[in-house]
Amino acid sequence: MKESLKEKRIRFVLIGFFIFLVIGAFLYRFELRETQDKDYSPPLALVLKKSADMNDNPVIALYEYKNGKHILAVYEIERTNRYKFNAMHVIELKEAPEQISPDRRDEGIWVKANKNWTYYSPNLHEEERELEHRIANSTSETSYSFDDKRAILTIDSKHSIVLEKGEKPTGLFALSEDRSVWLVITERNIKIAAIDTK
């Protein structure tokens, strides 16, 4: 059966319309991803309490960009329950923090955003506090070396943690007094690693 000129035109118009639709969907998806990436900030962490033994749970403060929101939370990590994170306090920040620091005497958190420091109490209530109480560096953060090709993070030249290929660490924190449990912060993720220190 021979196709008429009118049918041929309709076929080309339909093909063109569907091609336009597919290209439009790809462009929309790309633009959406770019917008999300622009707002995205890597995770930040702070150890508020180290674990003394297997039955003592560490407590951390963690900033993450989740579902388009800047979230600061305090978690207790259950060592005996596969390192389950239990949220104790959660707040939404207006913007991504540049840095978080511990307090000298309290278990509160200092958050730097837009070049200004704000103090949050242990239950994440914003409070007035003198900046002199802020500690510049966390005692739980540890230096490390990282082999990019093998994705291996080395601590103290003795112990190592294997990451997934393509992951790059941005911070490493001891979660236990004996340095057997670690919190690894990467550009997009967080990971708990347990190592044998004996």
Image: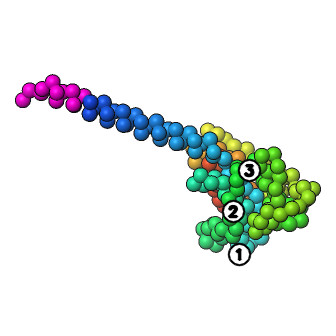
The part of the chain drawn in magenta is 1-12
Label 2 to label 3: alpha-carbon separation? 13 Å
- Mark 3 Cα within 10 Å, few/some/many (few <14, many 20+)? many
Residue at mark 2 = 91
Quadrant in the picture for residue 88: bottom right
Residue 142 vs 37, above or below: the answer is: below
User: Which of 87 and 192 lies nearest the eye of the viewer?
Assistant: 87
- Which residue is found at the position 25% from the left and 28% from the top? 12
- Mark 2 Cα within 10 Å, few/some/many (few <14, many 20+)? some
Left or right of 55 on screen, residue 149:
left
For the C terminus, the image quarter is bottom right
Left or right of 121 on screen, residue 192:
left
For the N terminus, the image quarter is top left
Label 2 to label 1: alpha-carbon separation? 28 Å
Q: Is residue 154 at least partly visible in the picture?
A: no
The image shows residue 197 at horizontal and vertical percentages of 73, 61
Q: Is residue 116 at least partly visible in the picture?
A: yes
Residue at mark 3 = 97
Query: Label 3 is placed on what type of residue?
Result: Pro
Element carrying mark 3:
loop
- Which residue is found at the position 82% from the left and 49% from the top? 116
- Which residue is found at the position 12% from the left and 26% from the top? 4
